[in-house]
Image: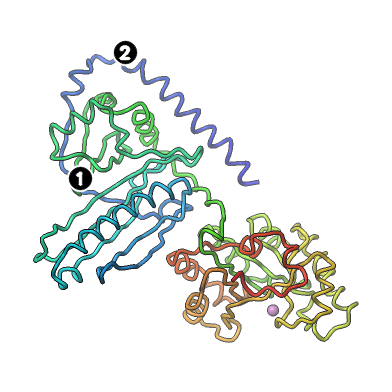
Amino acid sequence: MKRQAALPLIAGIFALSGCTAALAPSDTSTSPTPSSESADALQIEKTPLTLRPPEEAPGLWRTENHTDINNAPITRAGVRAPEQLHAPVEAWATERVDSFSTQVTSLSDEKDRQGAQLSMDPGICGASGTVLCYAIDAQTTFPASAPQHSESRYHAWITDSRDGFVMESTDLLSTEGRTKIHEQVPGDPTAIFPNEDGSLTLAVNGEGYRVSSTHEHAIDPMLSPDGKRLRHEFMAGTPLERIPHPKIDCQANPCVALTFDDGPGPYTAQLLDTLKEKDSKATFFLIGSHVSSYPDQVKREAEEGHAVGNHTWDHADLSKQSAATITNEVAATDQAIMDAGAPQPILVRPPYGATSPTVHSILASRGQAEIHWSIDTLDWKNLDVAKDIEMATATAQPGSIILMHDIHPETVAAVPEIIDDLHLAGYDLVTVPELLGGPVSNYLGFSVFSQQ
Ligand code: NI
């Protein structure tokens, strides 16, 4: 429902920018200022280069990766979204690492090598509607004794998540703009940030220069056709729309699944708010007899893209039940979940992880997969936010299924930091079906503990 509602909004923004573009030529024709005079009115002055944190763009988050070359540390902040940036950013970052590696390897002094470091930090250099300016500040540092110089290099891309458009920010400039800038600034720009006030920020040798004019149309001749269009897009200052989550590919990117048992409960709504804010998906294993107390939360779980699974009617130890009771426990819970407005569960988690060949075969015949876990946070016992964070994150690895309970306020309070920590470590947080990848029929009759 929400996604559909967003479509007319996007269309509206672009219709609006179309109007702006259509109005621009008539504005120019009535303007008393000829273009040559406009160009003279350009001002170029030094300015600090500042990037806004990626977290300011909804749907974007920072990841961090630490490696080294000859003991020289490399800190790389990565990008999880938007997807269309992955390839160009990766190619550029690889080039920086290669170049750093060559520099470090050429140092003959061991101390110089150990004192060298490279850090790459992403940030937002502009945003409007579906258009984002995404920059990386790459800093190489060498000790004063080394023949290599420390340097800071900015690189930026402009992307539109509406249609996957990507361009190098330096392609915003026209040939005329490039020449003009070359006359006044010592070096070629490595990045250009279009500002909301219509000015441009250039990054040259790690230093910032602001290009502005008192004449509204003086900057346009400096820009390529895409540059003009995008500058007006940024000047519109439309709030940035949520960046679509990249297509989930747990083969290519490390994923983990957070799972919450024994709900729904009084803290489920708060948990759903957190998951939404952090652009993360989870899997809920519900107790059938709890569903009628919180039907809206169950519906919300399904509507917001989480997986809703079955945890029996009254938390029964299925390994000790007759076939008829097992079937009733599961079927009644399925019905309650469907009555609340969620689809029939394809995942069942037996309470206590207690299972049997009978449980296997009953679930398989119902077309349901038996899902266990690989990390037990023991949150129900610890009831401690810091401990929950540690337990959920310390041993996480690609494919982990993490067991928690959303009926405990400490658990729900720990989730924001658990998600931040896992994001920082590079993980996508996905539902169990997303983690498993293939059709659930692959897992029928098995006990699934993790995707490893
Ligand atoms: Ni349970």
Q: Residues within 10 Å of mark 1 (few under 14, many from 20)?
A: many
- Secondary structure of the residue carrying tag 2 is helix
The structure residue drawn at horizontal position 21% and vertical position 22%, both measured from the top left corner, is 38
Amino acid type for the residue under numbered disc 1 = Gly
Point out residue 425 in the picture as x, y percentages from the top left corner.
44, 67
Q: Which quarter of the rendered picture does the C terminus lie within? A: bottom right
Query: Looking at the rendering, which quadrant does residue 274 occupy?
Result: bottom right
Closest to the observer: 447 or 295? 447
Do labels 1 and 2 touch, CB within 8 Å?
Answer: no
Colour style of the rendered protein structure: rainbow
Amino acid, disc 2: Ser
Residue appearing at x 83%, y 66% in the figure: 366
Give the x, y percent position of residue 296. 70, 60
Indicate yes or no: mark 1 CB to ligand 1 under 8 Å: no
Task: Give the answer, above or below, for where 47 lies relative to 281.
Answer: above
In space, the residues marked 1 and 2 are separated at their CA atoms by: 33 Å
Which comes before the other along the chain, label 1 or label 2?
A: 2
Q: Is mark 2 within 8 Å of ligand 1?
A: no
Decide if residue 337 is on the left or right side of residue 223.
right
The residue at the point 48 percent across, 68 percent down is 422
Circle on res. 29: 2
Q: Which residue is mark 1?
A: 208
Foreground residue among 175 and 192: 175
Residue 403 image position (x, y, % from top left) = 61, 76
Examine the image and state in which quarter residue 402 appears: bottom right
